[in-house]
Image (tube, grey):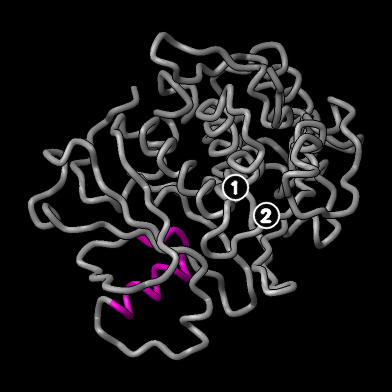
Amino acid sequence: MNDFWLSCGHHLLDRDDGGGLLVTDEFLKAYLARPELAPPPDACIAERTLHAALLLNPRRPVTARELASIADADARENWALMVGFRDRLIGHKTIEAAYLDLVRHGVGDTPPLFINQLVHVILRNVLDGCDDPFVLRAAEMFFRPQRLTVHGGSLIAADEETVAGASPQSVSPLVAMLGLPPAGDVDVLNEDNAASYWQRSDLFDMALDLTAGRRGLAALGEVIGKWIHHLHALEVTIEPLAEATDVNLIWYVGLDAAATAIGDALWNEDELDPAARERIVGLYRLSFQQPEVVLDKAKGEPIYLLLAMTPDQMLRMKPQNLITGLPIAQLETVS
């Protein structure tokens, strides 16, 4: 079986009987290797002592006094954010439960980077055993911003950090720890080069064709369905639509901020200018295989999912909207 996304740290985690991810000391220690937390040579004794103590016991309680005693203000803030995030993780049975708590009750000061890392490792769990590189590449959109461009009549999504030349090592210390090579040239994923995805999955250097009616959008729909099933314990059917005909947005979920704004405008019957319409990347129709879970105001109505890019051609998916935005009772389905 091919492995992928080693940089998310899934190999440091355990699973419970229900398939959820269990936080381990090894996983917590990986955060202590982040450059924001590794004490520099001139760090104060309080910071060095705290770091050493947590390396010995990453679940050790940290007091407000210990944090306040760190001399450097930036380091003090970084440690406060990290300790708060760690406490969220170890305060729940699974990583999935911690993520649900964050998105349902407010992320607070949790850095977006940490939220994306949770999405990354949860999706690695969701897609364990997947042998389709197109599905895996589509899943990257859940936790990594994409830059879109039209090339040869096709709409192509490429990883923003890779296009900008940022090193994956700045995202996860595990990349450096595992000795993964730096990203190279960006190739558009196709049948001829798909087999190379397994060696390149942590480089995020393969682009995806999101042209309507092609495999990319269908693959993303498959990921959406698996995400909903894992976190809501519900079976859904996701149908990608080639065009927005006979679409009545009684209930819709924007998969990103740009799509939500477009959906709101359509729901309010505002006229969309041509430029806004061109920013719509994908449209899906969702149906629940257990219709009894649907809230009364949406029963019998199609549910649409919208995906769009910003005016500067960026796409930043918000998978949390699939947790909070669907017309279902918000039950704690993952403990």
- Judged from the image, the secondary structure of the residue bearing numbered disc 1 is helix
Q: Quadrant of residue 39?
A: top right
Q: Is residue 114 above or below residue 282?
A: above
Res. 312 image quadrant: bottom right
Mark 1 and mark 2 in contact (Cβ < 8 Å)?
yes
Question: Which residue is more in the foreground, 259 or 285?
Answer: 285
Q: Between residues 141 and 216, which one lies in front from this camera angle? A: 216
> Magenta span has 89?
no
Amino acid type for the residue under numbered disc 1: Ala
Report whether 73 appears left or right of 282. right
Q: Amino acid at mark 2?
A: Leu
Instruction: Give the residues in magenta.
Output: 253-266
Query: On the image, numbered disc 2 is attached to which residue?
Result: 208
Q: Position of residue 27 (x, y in %)?
A: 64, 21
**Marking on residue 138:** 1
Write the residue at 67% across / 35% down: 69
